[in-house]
Image: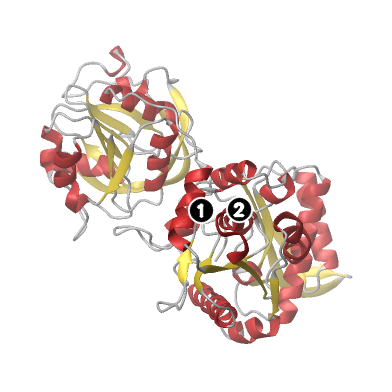
Amino acid sequence: MIIIIDFGSQTTHLIFRRMGEMGVKSTIIDPEDAINQINKLRPKGIILSGGPASVYGKNSPTVDKKIFGLKIPVLGICYGQQLLVHLLGGEVIAAKIKEYGPAFVSTKLKERSRTSSYYGEAKPALFVNIPDKFKVWMSHGDEVIKIPPGFRYLATSENIKAASVGDEKRNIYGVQFHPEVQHTDYGTEILKNFLNICQENPESREINIKDLVNDIKEKVGDKKVVMALSGGTDSFVAAALIARSINRNLIPVYVDSGLMRDDALKNVTQVFPKLFGMKPKVLKVKNVFLKKLKNIIDPEKKRKAIGMLYVRLFEKVAKRQKNVEFLGQGTTYADFIHSKSTKHAALIKSHHNVGGLPKKMKLKLLEPIRYFYTDQVRYIGKKLGLPEEVIYQQPFPGPGFAVRILGKITDKRLNKLKQADGIVMDEIERAGLKNKIFQYFAILTSTKSTAIKGDGRFYGEIVAIRAYTTKDRMTADWAKIPFHVLQHISTRIVNEVPEVSRVVYDITTKPPATMEWE
């Protein structure tokens, strides 16, 4: 058993996932309950997660420092490292250079410490069998500038001295980067090394489809479920699990809001009936959504308005049926974590199907894939026998084009974005990059610039292109699309889409940027 103390990191659940993938049982607890849970569960190791707070901030989450005297190995990650240093007598300050995204760390250090011998004499247990220099993913605004007695520096980055610190006699370690995320090289190996320090014995595990189906059966019983279909992978997989559990008590519904890509309606009306033997209800409500969103500019208000409208429409469908008690959704953990999922987490954005839902609902939520990431959802889809064209669709946000139109949403702007987005998809697929990029799309920026068209001055809107690679959507790197492909996209958009002056390509990683602009 490994205890993960959650300080509100966006990736706390990823630590939990990594433990499970390595066959180790773990649990996530609040810092306020740490000592009680440690005494109760007697774990072999303790991991302190990252978080959005500063250790020197007012009311920052903390733990009783008695945990460091229990002779249980401890690994602090990001905020977790800063907290253990702070509690044990070191010093943390606001960093002069903040790090968000990729960085390189080195474990081959050349100077001496007041509290330890020459750094390079022996590689610490946390970095055994790992290269001296490797890429990591950072996300921090504070840094350790003084280590506690008994500690030594284990790794540095270009900008900070304390990329990793440790007291190896007491098995207390800290890393400023995130080993749990996909984009950190050797992150899994670092976590495995920590498990070895804990003398934890892994056991192989995998997702059990029967357990997921039985959980739904037990929860739903003989009631009916209105299933919110989007036409995408997540809702297909969730619907497949629910259908396998309750058969004809599933009522699939697609809300044709006009905000989705055209292939979504095709998937729902043509593919879904072939796979499930039932015809979804399609609600044609584009005008209702455009009217609701007419004067909304703030992205949080957009998401909440869309969430409210979706739920009320599903409730109307449920009211016409007998014995309906649940609303089924394809919510994944990436949706959940951004919407302030835990006590100390920060709100990033209210997903329409999580934080954007109304407080009072007449239906209970049924979200069978809520605690899974995209790659795990695809694995479940494979196990359920869904075809690859369904499983490997490009993800699309529930609010659709509404969160890719910055500023006011009108029918004219919606059509303009759909045209630009279609060009992006067409050129990426024509270049043979469809399966090499996780997601790619266009954004209307509501920003204008001067251009020259037909030897005359033209003042039009800037379109941005976003494309990235990722596994679980918790971290992402921008896609290295060949320049000639980007040029084709740009040329076509400024020539074919009305009132567009130029095209820009977003090369920001996550963090600091989110995947969507809103």
The quarter of the picture where the C terminus appears is bottom right
Q: Where is residue 203 shown, x and y percent of the image?
A: 40, 27
- Residue occupied by mark 1: 369
Judging from the image, what secondary structure is the residue with disc 2 in? Answer: helix
Query: Between 172 and 58, which is closer to the camera in this rendering?
Result: 172
- Identify which residue, 289 or 244, lies in the foreground: 244
Residue that sits furthest to the top in the current view: 121
Quarter of the figure that contains the N terminus: top left
Q: Position of residue 42 (x, y in %)?
A: 18, 35
Give whichever of 440, 387 is nearer the camera: 387
Instruction: Identify the residue position indicated by label 2 in the image.
Output: 237
Residue 370 in view of the camera: no
The residue sitting at 33% across, 23% down in the picture is 201
**Mark 2 belongs to which amino acid?**
Val
Q: Are marks 1 and 2 in contact (CB under 8 Å)?
A: yes
Q: Nearer the viewer, residue 130 or 445?
A: 130
Say which mark, if any, is on residue 417: none
Alpha carbon distance from label 1 to label 2: 8 Å
Residue 348 appears at what percent x and percent y? Answer: 43, 62
Q: Is residue 234 left or right of residue 194?
A: right
Does residue 134 show up? yes
Badge 1 marks a residue whose secondary structure is loop
